[in-house]
Amino acid sequence: MVKPELLAVAILLAVCNKALIDYLFAPIRKKFPDLDLWFVLYVAFITGGVIGYLANINLFDGVAPGLEGIYGRILTACVVGGGSSLIHDVFDKKDTLVENG
């Protein structure tokens, strides 16, 4: 079971990362409204990953065997980099699978 306080921290980090990316790219979007900023998703994933890794949290500790330690931290960093909707998708589906069988 995921600890609720760790899940809250991960969601907070993901939301903060999105706000930071939106703030940094807002002037570019304003100055060049027709510019295709396809790469912003990847920038957000990388910055969120760094933020998640440096936060030293592991959402998967005790949830899945083999994800204790560094592997769980890296996966948590990827989930934080993916954003709060990804966190909801991952853990909502996991809880559904557990409930259904």
Image: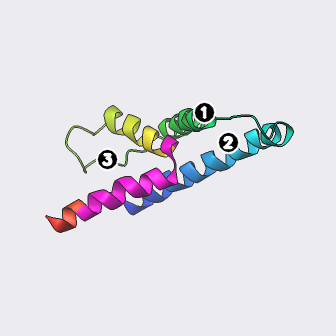
Which quarter of the picture shows residue 40? top right
**Magenta-highlighted stretch: main secondary structure?**
helix
Q: Nearer the viewer, residue 65 or 46?
A: 46
How dense is the environment of label 1, judged by Cα within 10 Å: few (below 14), some, or many (20 and up)?
few
Helix, strand or loop at label 1? It is helix
Total numbered labels placed on residues in the image: 3
> Residue at label 3?
60
Disc 2 residue crowd, few under 14, some 14–19, many 20+, Cα 10 Å: some
Q: Secondary structure at mark 2?
A: helix
Q: Residue at x 20, y 62 (%)?
A: 98
Contact (Cβ within 8 Å) of mark 3 with mark 1: no
Frontmost residue, 70 versus 17: 17
Q: CA distance from mark 3 to mark 1?
A: 24 Å
Mark nearer the N terminus (2 vs 1) = 2
Whether residue 41 is visible, yes or no, is yes
| Residue 1 seen in the figure | no
Mark 3 neighbour class, 10 Å CA radius: few under 14, some 14 to 19, many 20 or more: many
Kind of residue indicated by mark 2: Ile
Q: Residue 21, labelled with which disc?
A: 2
Q: Which mark is residue 99?
A: none
Classify the position of the C terminus by image quarter: bottom left
- The image shows residue 16 at horizontal and vertical percentages of 62, 50
- Report the mark closest to the observer, 2 or 3: 2
Distance between mark 2 and mark 1 Cα atoms: 8 Å
- Find the magenta span and give its range: 81-96
Residue type for callout 3? Phe
In the rendered view, tell whether residue 33 sits above or below residue 96. Answer: above
Asked whether, in this view, residue 97 is left or right of residue 73, the answer is left
Q: Is residue 86 left or right of residue 91?
A: right
Whether pointer 2 and pointer 1 mark residues with C-beta atoms closer than 8 Å, the reply is: yes
Residue 74 falls in image quadrant: top left
- The label shown at residue 43 is 1
